[in-house]
Image (cartoon, rainbow, N blue to C red):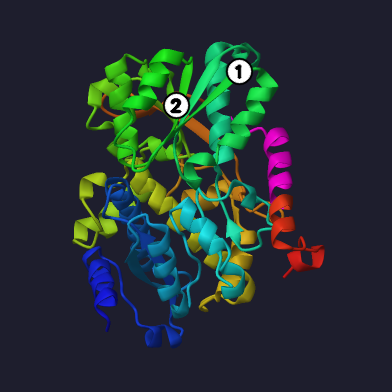
C-alpha cells in the first residue's frame, strides 16, 4: 500500500469510517459511498462537523438495517478543500463502485462535473456547486438537491425586502456582497445582478482572497461606502473574521446576511455577543437538537460509543447539513432499488435514476427523523434541485433562532437564469439536451 493511501485509510478509520477494499465491494454485498471531506486546514473547523453528520447518518442507516437489507460501506478521503486533492480522492475511490460523489466544494464540483458522465457517477451537491445544474436536461449527472446559491441569494434579498417593507423599497439602496474569491463566492453574482436591475439597488462586489483572514481593506471600503446591507458569502475562518471586522468598524450585525455556509456555530461562537443580530439564510434546516433524527443518532450511535466526533455537536447546523446530505443520497439509492430491485446493490447509473425520481413526501421525511426540519422534495428529469425553500435564522448571542417564515425563491427569475446559463454550457461543451425518451432511462 502506498504511503498516501495508507495515511488516507488511517484518517478514515480515525474518523469512524468503514474502510472497504475494492475486492470486498466486488462481491456486491454492500453499497459503496466515497466520503470526500476536509477536517484539516483553514476550513477544517467547518468541514469536520459536516463530515461527522454525514458519516453518522451512514452509520445510522446501517444500524437501522441498511437500505432494504443492503448495508453501506464508505471510505473517507481528506481533501483539505483543495480542488486538485478532491479530484485525486474522486479518482482513487470511484473504482470501488461509487454510488454517487458529494465533493463538498464548488471548485471540485466544476472539475468532477467534466468526468462524471464518462464514469457514470452522479455528482450530488446539496446546497452548493453549479446553480445552472438544476437543469437536468443539460446536466444529466449533477444534482444540486434542496437549493442552489441562486436560491440562497434570492431568499436573502427577499428577507431584506421584507425588512424594508417590500422589494420596491430597495430602490436606491446599497447592498454589498462580500465574497470568497473562488467559484463558490462568485456563484450568487448573476442572480444578485438580475435583482439589482429589477429593483434599482446598487450592488457592490467585494472579493476576499482565500482563506479570508485579512479583510481590513474590505471593511474600510464598507465603512466608506456605508451600504444599507451586507451579504456575506464566506466559508471557514472568513466568516468569523468578517463579523469581527464588522464589530470593529461599527457595522450593524443585524444588517448582515450570510449564505448558509456562513450561518453555523463555528462562524459565531468565538464572537458570541459581538455577533448578536447577525442573520443567515438556512438550507431549510437550522440547528435541530430536538429532532427525532438527533435523538436516534444519540441513542443508536453515541450512547453506544459508536458516534463520529463530539457528542455535543450532534444537532448543530453543519452536523445537520451533513446528515441531510447523506440522507438525500441514501434516498436516491432507495428510489433506485424501488425500480431496479429491492435488496440489491445499485450501480451509479441506477442511483442516478433514483436521484432524478426522488419523491420525499412529508410523511417519508418524518419517518426518517426529519419532521420539522425539512419540507418535501421532488425531483424530475428537468428539475434536479427539487425544492427552493429557505428560512432566515439569527444569532441571539448564544444560539441560532429562526426569525422568518418559509421563503420560496422566485422561479420567474431563477428558471430563465438556469435555462440560459445551462444552454450556454451545452453550447460550449457541444452537448445535446436530453430527449423525453432519455428522461425515461
- Does 253 appear in magenta? no
Res 277 visible: yes
In the shown orientation, is residue 172 left or right of residue 323? Answer: right
Res 408 visible: no
**The residue stretch that appears in magenta:** 407-422
Tell me: residue 124, above or below residue 317. Answer: below
| 40 vs 136, nearest the viewer | 40
Q: How many marks?
A: 2
| 174 vs 45, nearest the viewer | 174
Tell me: residue 16, above or below residue 53. Answer: below
Q: Which mark is residue 350?
A: none
Tell me: residue 325, above or below residue 391. Answer: below
Give the labeled residue for mark 2.
257
Give the residue at the far right of this rendering: 436
Instruction: Kindly report the secondary structure that dominates the magenta region of the rendered protein.
Output: helix
Q: Secondary structure at mark 2?
A: strand
Residue 19, position as x, y percentages in the image:
31, 75
Q: CA distance from mark 1 to mark 2?
A: 16 Å
Mark 1 against mark 2, which lies toward the viewer? Answer: 1
Q: Which mark is residue 201?
A: 1
Q: Residue at x 55, y 37 (%)?
A: 188
Q: Earlier in the sequence, mark 1 or mark 2?
A: 1
In the shown orientation, is residue 391 left or right of residue 38? Answer: right
- Does 415 appear in magenta? yes
Q: Residue at x 60, y 40 (%)?
A: 388
Determine which quarter of the picture holds residue 200.
top right
Amino acid at each position: 500500500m502506498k504511503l498516501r493511501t495508507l495515511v488516507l485509510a488511517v484518517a478514515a478509520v480515525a474518523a469512524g469510517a468503514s474502510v472497504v477494499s475494492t475486492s470486498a465491494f466486488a462481491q456486491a454485498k454492500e453499497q459503496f459511498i466515497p466520503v470526500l471531506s476536509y477536517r484539516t486546514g483553514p476550513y477544517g473547523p467547518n468541514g469536520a462537523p459536516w463530515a461527522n453528520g454525514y458519516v453518522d447518518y451512514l452509520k445510522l442507516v446501517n444500524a437501522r438495517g441498511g437500505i432494504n437489507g443492503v448495508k453501506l460501506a464508505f471510505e473517507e478521503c481528506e481533501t483539505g478543500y483543495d480542488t486538485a486533492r478532491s479530484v485525486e480522492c474522486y479518482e482513487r475511490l470511484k473504482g470501488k463502485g461509487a454510488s454517487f460523489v458529494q465533493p463538498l466544494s464548488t471548485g471540485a464540483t466544476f472539475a468532477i462535473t467534466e468526468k462524471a458522465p464518462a464514469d457514470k457517477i452522479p455528482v450530488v451537491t446539496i446546497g452548493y456547486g453549479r446553480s445552472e445544474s438544476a437543469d437536468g436536461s443539460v446536466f444529466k449527472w449533477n444534482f444540486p438537491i434542496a437549493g442552489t446559491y441562486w436560491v440562497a441569494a434570492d431568499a436573502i434579498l427577499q428577507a431584506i425586502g421584507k425588512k424594508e417593507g417590500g422589494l420596491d423599497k430597495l430602490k436606491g439602496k446599497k447592498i454589498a456582497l462580500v465574497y470568497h474569491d473562488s467559484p463558490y463566492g462568485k456563484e450568487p453574482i448573476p442572480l444578485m445582478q438580475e435583482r439589482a436591475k429589477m429593483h434599482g439597488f446598487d450592488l457592490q462586489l467585494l472579493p476576499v482572497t482565500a482563506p479570508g483572514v485579512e479583510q481590513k481593506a474590505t471593511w474600510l471600503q464598507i465603512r466608506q461606502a456605508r451600504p444599507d446591507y451586507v451579504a456575506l458569502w464566506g466559508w471557514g475562518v472568513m466568516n468569523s473574521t468578517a463579523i469581527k471586522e464588522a464589530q470593529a468598524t461599527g457595522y450593524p450585525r443585524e444588517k448582515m446576511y450570510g449564505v448558509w455556509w456562513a450561518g453555523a456555530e463555528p462562524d459565531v461562537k468565538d464572537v458570541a455577543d459581538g455577533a448578536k443580530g447577525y442573520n443567515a439564510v438556512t438550507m431549510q434546516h437550522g440547528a435541530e437538537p430536538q429532532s427525532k433524527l438527533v435523538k436516534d443518532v444519540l441513542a443508536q450511535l453515541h450512547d453506544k460509543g459508536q458516534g463520529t466526533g463530539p457528542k455535543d455537536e450532534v444537532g448543530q447546523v453543519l452536523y445537520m447539513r451533513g446528515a441531510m446530505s447523506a440522507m438525500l443520497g441514501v434516498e436516491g439509492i432507495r428510489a433506485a432499488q424501488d425500480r431496479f430491485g429491492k435488496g440489491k446493490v445499485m450501480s451509479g447509473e441506477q442511483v442516478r435514476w433514483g436521484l432524478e425520481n426522488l419523491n420525499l413526501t412529508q410523511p417519508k421525511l418524518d419517518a426518517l427523523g426529519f419532521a420539522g426540519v425539512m419540507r418535501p422534495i421532488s425531483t424530475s428529469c428537468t428539475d434536479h434541485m427539487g425544492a427552493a425553500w429557505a428560512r432566515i435564522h439569527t444569532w441571539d448571542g448564544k444560539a441560532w433562532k429562526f426569525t422568518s417564515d418559509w421563503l420560496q425563491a422566485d422561479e420567474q427569475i431563477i428558471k430563465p437564469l438556469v435555462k440560459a446559463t445551462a444552454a450556454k454550457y451545452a453550447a460550449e461543451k457541444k452537448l445535446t439536451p436530453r430527449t423525453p425518451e432519455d428522461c425515461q432511462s
